[in-house]
Image (cartoon, grey):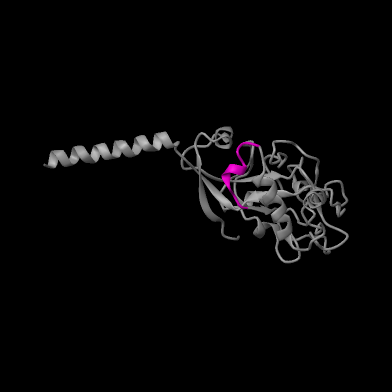
Amino acid sequence: LAPVAQAVDIDINHDIVVAAGLSVGDTFQLAFVSNVSASQWDDANADDQTSSSNIGWYDNMLQDLADNGTYNGVAALNLTWKTIGSDGSVEAKNHASLGATTPLYRLDGLQVATGYSDLWDGSIINAIQRDQNGGTPGNEILTGSKDDGSRADNNNYIGSGSNCVRGHSGATNGDWIHSDSDGSLDTNYDLNSKMYAMSEETLTVVPEPATLSLLVLGGLGVLARRRRRRA
């Protein structure tokens, strides 16, 4: 279990917080599915590295998509985004790491998992089927991973060559990341497939600024009264 980055504050009235029904002090992380494939993003950015064996290339793609996302204020959160996937050097469960007891939510507030173990136990609560612009893109997702978050067998990981395990974004069983429920493993290295992303930071729900100011002022008022009594 890799360490999760420092927490980022998010206002209690933020659209994602409201949709998820969270309260002040609650912590969580976010996930989305890309609305474009690696091939489409590569073409748009003239990067010419679609078949890169370095998962950092895919991280850069997802970061760019999130930074320009239009759904529920995702861009303004200024989060760091990582691929939920495995290449030859890192595994999904460690690359995009979820806190042990930190719940994972979609950008529309639906919960995906209650924490690290729940994410990698072979099923999720709700499918990761919402993109950075609020859409619901196609099913096929490049992951290169097993449903426990480890690297796929037989070199079927991201950047390995001709084959790569895929998941289905509409699934809540193990097929969400390792599609084999029909008896045959989906290892089509189709670069028109989409990608999953997870926030590296943990978000902490805080009071709205006006409420926080009132609390501070109230506290100062109490201190002032105590000082007058002592005088």
| Lateral position of residue 166 relative to residue 71, left or right | right
> In the depicted view, which residue is nearer to us: 50 or 110?
50
Above or below: residue 109 compared with residue 118? above
- Where residue 123 appears, as percent x and y from the top left, is 71, 46
- Where residue 173 appears, as percent x and y from the top left, is 74, 44
- Quarter occupied by residue 97: bottom right
As for residue 77 lying within the magenta part, the answer is yes
| Lateral position of residue 32 relative to residue 5, left or right | right
Would you say residue 121 is visible in this rendering? no
Magenta span covers which residues? 71-80
At 65% from the left and 50% from the top, the residue drawn is: 198
Principal secondary structure, stretch drawn in magenta: loop
Would you say residue 30 is visible in this rendering? yes
Count of labels in the image:
0
- Quarter occupied by residue 75: top right
- Where residue 204 appears, as percent x and y from the top left, is 50, 45
Above or below: residue 81 compared with residue 219? below
Q: Quadrant of the C terminus?
A: top left
> In the depicted view, which residue is nearer to us: 188 or 40?
40
| Lateral position of residue 9 relative to residue 173, left or right | left
